[in-house]
Amino acid sequence: MNRLVHGTSLALTLAVIWYLLSGHTEALLLGLGCGSAATITWLALRMDLIDHEGHPLHLTFRAPLFWVWLMWEIIKANGQVIKIILDPKLPINPRRFRVPASQKTDIGKVIYANSITLTPGTICLDVTESDLDIHALTADGELGLKSGEMDRLVTRLEGDS
Amino acid sequence: MISTVLDSLSWLLLLSGCACLLISAIGLLRMPDLFTRMHAAGIGDTLGAILVLAGLMLQAGLSITLVKLVLILFFLLFTSPTACHALARAALAGGQKPLLAENLNTENPISESSPTEQPLP
Amino acid sequence: MMFEVAAVALFPAMFLALARAIAGPTVYDRVLAVNTFGTFTVLMIAVLGFMTDQKDFIDIALAYALINFIGTIAVLKFFAVGDFGYQQESKK
């Protein structure tokens, strides 16, 4: 049942992307698009790649709100790093530390780690079962992560699934 | 009227995006070691790409080009942290040690110390 | 006009990234610089497409963004394992 839902959504996504990238409505091109979408879905099913991790459907509706918040965080963090680079003294204070990750699933941890890396000034070096190894450019970055706001939001995004 | 507003907004976005890319490239040259350089490269990968592509999106209008620009932005935002993480893992596995604050001599500003020459692995 | 200015502003950024790729000093610095250079190239191709009003360039930029990522991962894999396959693991 689950495989069916995820396979269908994969095939639909592939078909929509084909249409958006080609922009043609001739029968031949649409037919070729449907054919390749079906082939890829069949291959993915055969390779057993279709599951909730490859195509996280359950996040579809909660993700956009998180992206808006993340975008704002990215802009703020960029401002700080730009100020540091343009400062003639280059006031960096690089540090390495660990922060706990309260997400239950692998996909939640991946989202958290990627969000950390996406905000300039903090990079995720390693992921373990319970925490993340972080490299930060300044003390501000460390304090921001240790406040745990992003951790909480990713856990909420992940939900109960 | 509306096209003038859109034009000036896209000017603003494009120019600030290019400024971000330039700053990110300058940071790439100024930073003292690999891991701090990755922070500098992150600016170009995130804010620089977002601003430049947003400026182009405003010029594209409602067309298939807009969709393609959104797709480019998505790919860049999804792949750049993965590439960054892979690079950090590979560098750590290859024996690179991040330069940390406690190892820095505070009397000598870091910008004056030259990056340590390390042999190729 | 707007796109010409953006393209001209992108050139020094690409040049600086290339300078870091040449300066090194480690291979990881070079990979990082080339990855950044690739991102700049993607944006440059998109801007050039608008400048010359050839919207096909956007498709090239899209393909370049994907190839850039895969290329970076492949080079890192090559330096980490010394092989594109899994020979190293069987040697352990």
Image (cartoon, coloured by chain):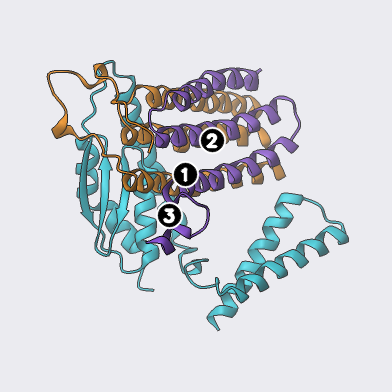
Chain colours: A cyan, B orange, C purple
Given residues A112 and B116, the one toward you in this image is B116
The image position of residue A108, as x and y in percent, is 36, 63
Residue visible at 77% across and 67% down in the picture: A35
Q: Quadrant of the N terminus of chain C?
A: top right
* Vertical side of C14 occupied by A105: above or below: below
Judged by depth in the image, the label closer to the viewer, 2 or 3, is 2
Q: CA distance from mark 2 to mark 3?
A: 26 Å
Query: Residue B80 has which mark?
Result: 1
Q: Nearer the viewer, residue B13 or B20?
A: B20
Query: Residue C64: where, in percent of width, then height?
Result: 63, 40
Label at residue A65: 3
Mark 1 belongs to which subunit? Answer: B
| Amino acid identity at mark 1 | Ser
Whether tag 1 and tag 2 are in contact, CB under 8 A, the answer is yes
Please determine if labels 1 and 2 lie on a single subunit. no
Disc 2 chain ID: C
Q: CA distance from mark 1 to mark 3?
A: 21 Å
- Residue type pointed to by label 3: Leu
Residue holding disc 2: C39
Does residue C26 appear to the left or right of C59 in the view shown?
A: left
Does residue B95 appear anywhere in the picture? yes
